[in-house]
Image (spheres, rainbow, N blue to C red):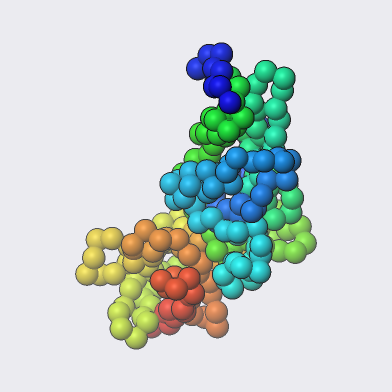
């Protein structure tokens, strides 16, 4: 088919909702986008672009997901590309939904390239520009699984913060090293290694009492919590599993 290009101008519009796609590490891309009879390899194109933006791309088949992801599917955001073609333009809608089916982001891409394969590819590349690089600070492994099943009253949220801020400082040990707990503010404290100027771990409060988002010394994010008076950090392993590092108060 002869390529007919009316103009090189492409258009893109975006609808952004409360949560951000970049808060997720995992994105599910289906084997085939359902609104296309022929999707011209858009699934592979989207997968390639998202991997370039530091996302871990999963198949649409949940049975093939890693065990730790299947245990908490709310770690995953679901991507879809919708055929929005008009008479003269190839258009797509890039749609991201969370595990509850709530739309997190919709980005529309329009291409003036009339040939289907190149036109749809061009439109998708325009739409995906609105997706930021993965930075799963606010939506990390385990956090959504510990959210209260019932709505939390404002008083019940503020009480844990107060309790955490009143817990003060102290020394903790994991049997190999001793660290100092230092309260930065009512929502944040660190475990500081006396032999290093960089905090061993930084803890930030969540809406769940005694459960924290933790930034490790190497920059990784994970989950921490109090258990039987001890501070526990879930340490990511290369295999995708987690091990417990337990700090007992001295």
Q: Is residue 87 left or right of residue 188?
A: right
Farthest residue to the top: give it: 6
Who's the residue at 30% across and 79% down the image?
177
How many marks are shown on the rendered structure? 0
Picture coordinates of residue 232, whole percent (x, y): 48, 76
Query: Which residue is located at x 65 percent, y 21 percent?
Result: 89
Please determine whether, in this image, residue 127 is positioned above or below residue 206: above
Name the outermost residue toward the right. 150
Residue 120 spot, x, y in % from top left: 60, 32
- Tell me if I can see residue 57 in this picture: yes
Q: Nearer the viewer, residue 235 or 69?
A: 69
Using the rendered view, name the quadrant where residue 59 is placed: bottom right
Q: Residue at x 68, y 45 (%)?
A: 33
Give the position of the N terminus as an image quadrant.
Answer: top right
- Name the residue at the bottom extreme: 175
Q: Quadrant of residue 19?
A: top right
Examine the rendered structure and indicate whether residue 165 appears above or below residue 109.
below
Question: Is residue 242 or residue 107 the one in the foreground?
Answer: 107
Of 77 and 47, which appears nearest the observer?
A: 47
Q: Position of residue 134 (x, y in %)?
A: 48, 48
- Which residue, as the protein is rendered here, is positioned at the far front? 1
Q: Residue at x 57, y 43 (%)?
A: 41
Picture coordinates of residue 30 (x, y %)?
65, 53
Nearer to the camera, 3 or 207: 3
Q: Quadrant of the C terminus?
A: bottom left
User: As drawn, is 180 to the left or to the right of 61?
Assistant: left
Asked whether residue 163 appears in the rendered view, the answer is: no
Vertical order, 5 against 225 (above or below): above
């Amino acid at each position: 088919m002869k390529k007919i290009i009316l103009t090189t101008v492409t258009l893109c519009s975006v609808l952004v909702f409360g949560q951000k796609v970049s808060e997720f590490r995992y994105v599910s891309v289906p084997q085939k986008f359902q609104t296309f009879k022929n999707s011209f390899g858009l699934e592979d194109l989207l997968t390639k672009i998202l991997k370039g933006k530091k996302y871990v791309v999963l198949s649409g088949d949940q049975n093939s997901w890693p065990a730790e992801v299947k245990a908490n599917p709310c770690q995953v955001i679901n991507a879809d590309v919708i055929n929005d073609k008009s008479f003269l333009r190839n258009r797509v809608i890039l749609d991201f939904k969370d595990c509850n089916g709530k739309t997190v982001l919709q980005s529309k891409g329009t291409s003036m390239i009339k040939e289907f394969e190149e036109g749809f590819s061009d439109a998708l590349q325009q739409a995906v520009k609105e997706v930021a690089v993965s930075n799963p600070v606010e939506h990390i492994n385990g956090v959504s699984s510990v959210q209260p099943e019932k709505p939390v009253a404002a008083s019940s949220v503020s009480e844990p913060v107060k309790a955490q801020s009143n817990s003060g400082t102290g020394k903790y040990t994991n049997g190999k090293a001793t660290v100092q707990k230092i309260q930065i503010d009512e929502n944040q404290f660190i475990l500081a290694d006396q032999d290093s100027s960089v905090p061993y771990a930084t803890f930030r409060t969540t809406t769940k009492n005694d459960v924290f988002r933790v930034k490790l010394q190497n920059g990784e994010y994970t989950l921490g919590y109090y258990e039987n008076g001890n501070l526990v950090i879930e340490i990511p392993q290369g295999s995708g599993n987690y091990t417990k590092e337990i700090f007992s108060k001295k």
